[in-house]
Each structure stands twice: as structure tokens, then as C-alpha cells.
Amino acid sequence: MILCLVDKHDQAYRRAARNSFTLQDGLVKIADILEVGAKVPENKGELHSRNHPADGKVGTLFIGYRDSELVAMGVPPDVLPHVRALEDANQLPDIERLLAPETYDKLVGIALGVVERPKVPDGQLQQSLVRYQGGHDLHRFLDSEEFKHALEGSLEEWMLFLAPDQRQLAMRAFSGPARVKGVVGSGKTVIAIHRARNLARQAHAQGDKILFLTFGNRLPGVVHHLLHHLAGDGAPELEAIECKTVHAWCDQYLRAQDQPLYVPGKAALQQELSAAVTGVQSLLPSLALWAQPLDFFEDEIRYAIKGRALRCLDDYLAVERSGRGTALREADRRAMFAVYEAYQAGMRGRRVHDWDDFPLEAMRVLDADPSPPRYRAAVVDEIQDLTGAILRLVRRLVPPGPDDLFLVGDGLQRLYPGGYALGRLGIDITGRSALLTRNYRNTHEILRAAHAMMLGLRYDDLDDEPSQVQEPELSLRHGPLPTLRGFRRIEDELVWVAEQIQLLKQDFGYSERDLALLYRFRHPYTDLCHRLLGGTCKLIELTNEPDTYFGSGLKHSTFDSAKGLEFKAVFVLGVTDGVFVPKADPTLHELELQDYLERERRRLYVAMTRARDRVYLTYAGGQPSRFLADIPEAFLDRESG
């Protein structure tokens, strides 16, 4: 039975369009109350009177919860009247200081529509609702049977599955920029895809466009494919979506303005940078800066100078270089900026640029463009790997307003140095940030092992303060323990992998398209995989084309290129300490080495959590990665080689 308190006819229908009802623990619960036009009866004998305090204003945000339930969540009795008075989720920050952090997070989750164990209503009622009151805004109830169906279905169906809490975020109206962050496998990208389609419907009706931007160049094709699968080929809203990497958008725009940029090979850019370092060093030979390797200068220019869109020496001297590890004295900073200027001058002389110039040049041209492109909204995935300069560009392309920016990312999966805080870029997400803690992708065993490897790690989550690793809600799905296996030679490693692939196909019904081989570096695994596995498997290297991911064949890729993707079973190759990570690198000082190791730890974490059901870790000619030592014995099947 669904019980509703309603007021006027039109208001009741508007309310029903944005609310979902479910039965939980024997009580009717109301989820996702964002705007309420109906009035709550205040008489003690009415339906919900037992939920209200004896006096004070009665709000509607937590009307479906008893006082005892709220107290059990950690709400102090003397704070209950304040909680009961809330009408809207945006009022929650007003009482944050009165609550413990974990209690506040629970209330935010309730306000955002996080509902445990939703039940499917009576089948006849459900059909009637769909038939007579259907439409894109009607909440479709999802239960374990639907989740099971998604697991057993095609890769597209699985990657587009939305749980109720995810659906609320995809469809919710926000008064400004919003951010979704959460644990690995919590469905951030799928929320972004559904969100993009929802916004595209609105944009298409008004002749506008929206942007879907990513960092990794594998994802735009995948997202484009999934959007077509979700909406259907020929759906009119697809015309309103541009799905690109940030650099591809910049390149297209600059070419349209007859100002294309040419990027030479990596070796040529490094030669230009090396010449700049040598030239400045000859003028200031005594500085400690020159002990740094060339990679340090490359990253400093990319993330600390260009990544923050700094325009002059004074800006660089004043900037806080968060995420860069090594502190630089003023004299070193002056020399570093001189290197940057010499590097830029050298490239100008050759009429070339590097990839980090693209957002900066796009901004420069936009500032002079009499009719610059404008988008109704932007959905941006993988924001943890973007720079502040890129987010400034996105902000420039989308005028401020309701539902303007939808930002998705997880700082724990950040693979590149540097960092920024959204608030310092003029992107205020106060009251419009959601944290997802439930993992839907991985089995209990995979997530438990991967999470144990990350415990205690502090990381930049695009806030003003460092974040600590969140405790995820472990999956209810179970599978075998992750397997770690060592070998004397890489050839032996890959022979064993070939045997396991055949077992997975013969004994467990996997197809080659369900499996992936992931490695940190292409050399030597790309060639060896083809030589040792190509005779028995159809090997497909992941590229920008979505068919290489969704089509047939055994996939293989680097860790970085696989980010954002998932597979039923994954072989993580070459996790050998001293190869996968350096044991002792004299070119890296202590803080740089620590920062490097933390990023490599995150890379292994990302690779392991690409696996939905099974993960195998292999190494050869040494010891396993030191990161795996942090996984308890009971969480990892360490087989002898």
C-alpha cells in the first residue's frame, strides 16, 4: 500500500513526479524529498503525528523516520527539533555543526534518496503506474532481481544499471554546480551518463547543447556507445550531446578559429626542455634545483605552472604548490620560472606546442571571440585527473545557473601529480555534493583486498584539506580470493596466464571478451602477449574505438588506459617490485619518491578494481610489489610459483 498526503491536484502530481516510495523494515519510507507543496497535518491523531516533536515547527525532510530511528543514527535528542524542522536538503548544512560527521553523512544520504533494500510494489499496481502515469520522470523500482538480470546481461546493460540512490542523483535538479564523489565501483560514471541524457533532453527541446568531457581518451567512445545504447540510435537528444576529451574539444575549437596547434613527438619536447634547463643552469649554477631529474621540470611546468594557468613570475612565487612534494625556495622558484619561459620561447621559435598549451590557448582565443560557444550544461568525468586550468575553461564555456556543472571523480584514483580545490576556482558546490559509499562492481573479496592496500593513505580529493580513505560498503556478491602468483621468467608468467584463460572459458563459461590483461608499461608485455597468447586467443588492444572494448576478443591495455572501464576477470601482469616500482631511485628525493610511490599504489588499486568477479596478480623475476604486503594473508591467495 502506498499512502500519500496530498494538497492541490497539480501540486500533488508535481510532488509525485519527484518522489519515490518504498517499503523498508515494515514502514512506508519516502525518498528524495526535494520540494514539497503539500502540508503536513499537525494534529496528534493524524497519520504521521508520532514522528513529530511535541512543539516547534514541523518540517518534511525526515517525515518518514521515527524519532527513535533518528536517535539510533546518532542524532542527539536535544537536536531532534532542529532536524524535524528541516524542509529541504539544502538546509542540512545549517545544522552540520550540531552533529557528529558520521551522523551528518547518514542524514545527507537519506536526503539524497539513499534507500536500503527497495521492494518492488504489487505487479498490477506497477503496470498501472507505468501505463497511466508513466514517463521519463517516473521512478522505476529496482530490486535484487533487476540487479541480477544486469549482472547476467550484456556488458552494456551492466554498465548502464542504476540503483535507486544513483538514479536520484542522475535525475535530481540542482541550483548550481554539483559534485558526485565516491568509492571505486560506486557507479559515478554511469550516473554521469544518465545525467547527460537527462540534461540533453532538456537542452534539445530548447535548441541548446551540453558537453560530456573526460580526461582519458578511451572513455569518450565508450560513453558515446553507451548513450546510443541507452537512448536508442536516432534518439533526438543525442544530437544535443558533444562527448569528447578536453584536449579534443580544444583542438576542434582552435582549428575552427584557424589557430591549430602542432605537437611534436615526446623526444622533441624533452630535448627542448633539456635545452631550457641547461641554459638557465649555466647562468645560476649553484642552486639545489639542478639536482632534480628532467621529469621534475616537466611535471612542475605541467601541473604547477600551466595546470594552474599562471601568467607571471609573481603568481608562481605566491602559489601554493599542493601535490608537488618538494618545497622550492624563492631562488629555486625564480630559476624554475626562467626555465619555463625559456622552454616556451624555444617552442614558439619552432612553432610547436605541448598538450598542456591546449586549454590555455583555447582560453586566450575564447577571450577574444565575439561569439564564443556556449553550452547549457557540462558533465565532467574523472575530474581528479584534470588541472585547475581545464576546470576554469569548463566554467568559461557554461554560464552559471541551475544544473550547469555536474562533476564526477574520486581523488583516490588520481594518477597524476598536482591538484586544485574547486572552491578556489570559483566553483561552489556547497550543499550540492554527494558521497557514494556502496560498491556495485566488485565482489566482496576483490574490494576487501584492494581497500586493505589503501588504508591509512591521505590523498587530495579536490577539497581544501587532505582526505582519508573512506570505508566502502562491501559488496554482497562473493567470489574467489584475488590470486597472487610469482614466476622465474616473464615467459613462464604468460604461459600460466594462458592456462588460466582456458580454464575460465572451459570450466566457468567465460568468453574472451569478458577478460582483460593489464600491465603498467607496454614493454615488454605487449609484444610478449601477442607472441605467447596470440596463437590461442584473439588479442585486442584497447584504443579510442569502442568496438575494441565492447567487441569480441581478449582485451589488453596499460593500467592508465583501462581507467573507467571494467571486466569480469582481470589479469594484472608484471607487479614486480623494482620493475613496477623502484626499490631505490637516486634521482628521486624523499618527498618526490613518496609522492611517486603513492601514485603507483593508486595505479595498482585502479587496475585491481577493474575486475568485477575475479582478479589475478602475477610477477616474474623478483618479489611482488611492496604494496601487496599491506593486504592481510586471509584476503589474498598467495600461491607458490
Image (cartoon, rainbow, N blue to C red):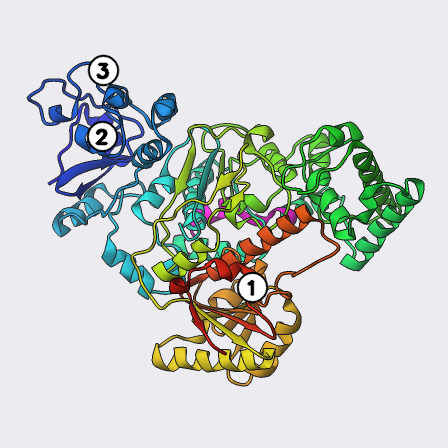
Magenta stretch in the rendered image: 231-247
Q: Which residue is mark 2?
A: 71
Q: Amino acid at mark 3?
A: Lys
Please, is residue 509 above or below residue 294 in the view? below
Q: CA distance from mark 3 to mark 2?
A: 19 Å
Q: Quadrant of residue 304?
A: top right
Residue 547 horizontal side relative to residue 170, left or right: right
Q: Which mark is residue 625?
A: 1
Q: Is residue 236 magenta?
A: yes
Give SS at disc 1.
loop
Q: Where residue 181 sits in the image (x, y, percent)?
A: 45, 42
In front of the other: label 1 or label 2? 1
Residue 625, located in which quarter of the rendered image?
Answer: bottom right
Q: Earlier along the polypeptide chain: callout 3 or callout 2?
A: 3
Cβ atoms at labels 3 and 2 below 8 Å apart: no
Location of the N terminus by quadrant is top left
Quarter of the image where one finds residue 91: top left
382 vs 131, nearest the viewer:
382
Assign a secondary structure to mark 2.
helix
Q: Could you tell me how far apart the alpha carbons at marks 1 and 2 are, in whole angstroms? A: 45 Å
Give neighbour class at mark 3: few <14, some 14-19, many 20+ (Cα, 10 Å): some
Q: Position of residue 516 (x, y in %)?
A: 49, 69
The local crowd at label 1, few if under 14, some if 14 to 19, many if 20 or more residues have their Cα within 10 Å, is many
What distance separates the C-alpha of mark 1 from that of mark 3? 59 Å
The dot on residue 57 is 3
